[in-house]
Amino acid sequence: MSKAIKKYSGITLIEVLVYMALFGVVFALVVGVLIQTREQNRRARDSIKIEQNMMFIDEHINMVFNDVDSINAAGSVFDNDTGTLQLTLNDASTVEYERVGGTLNFTRDSTTSPLSNNAVTVSQFRIEQVLDEDSNLIGVRVSCEVNSQFDSDNSKSWSNLYYIQ
């Protein structure tokens, strides 16, 4: 009686463990890249929202200054990070820009509207006087810093001069 030796074809337990370990390493690398890409995309979206808010605020102030008759120095708060800017328009109405909490508000005819949206925080709204040689108030320098609501390290600031036309 002779016994035939059967050869089994297949993979060993060691080979299965090696393949699983390699798959785990590749999977971990892919997941790490995906998480990093997602974070970069979120930061880019936050930066775009900050830029859009800054541009809107700048354009709004610039547009209003085209119709400004005078700057109300008594009602404005200068050289302070929570500045207030009161303006008298050519039609004798008054408008006001004011930082309340983390929002920049615009008030006209007793109606207050936020200029910054809830995706950002206005951390600085600083107003500085611009005087002529006779010490007349002829304009203001506005400095503003805007932060992401979700990532306080993601912030941008700008400064601009606005003159009475």
Image: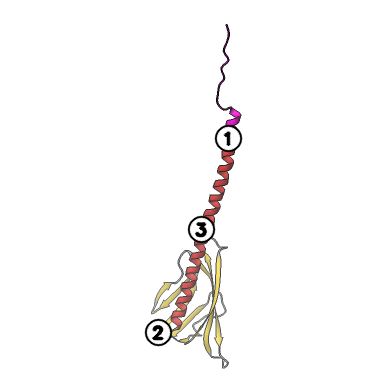
Region of the chain picked out in magenta, as a range:
1-17
Q: State which mark lies toward you, 1 or 3.
A: 1
Q: Nearer the viewer, residue 152 or 84?
A: 152
On the question of residue 120 being in view, the answer is no
Q: Earlier in the sequence, mark 1 or mark 2?
A: 1
* Secondary structure found at label 3: helix
In the picture of the structure, the residue carrying the numbered disc 3 is 42
Q: Residue flagged by tag 1: what amino acid is it?
A: Tyr
Identity of the residue drawn at 56% across and 88% down: 131
- Residue 69, located in which quarter of the rendered image? bottom left
Q: Residue furthest bottom?
A: 134
Question: Marks 1 and 3, how far apart in space?
Answer: 35 Å
Image location of residue 52, percent across then percent down = 47, 68
* Secondary structure found at label 1: helix
State the quadrant of the N terminus. Answer: top right
In the picture of the structure, the residue carrying the numbered disc 1 is 19
Q: Residue flagged by tag 2: what amino acid is it?
A: Ser
In the picture of the structure, the residue carrying the numbered disc 2 is 93
Q: Nearer the viewer, residue 99 or 9?
A: 9
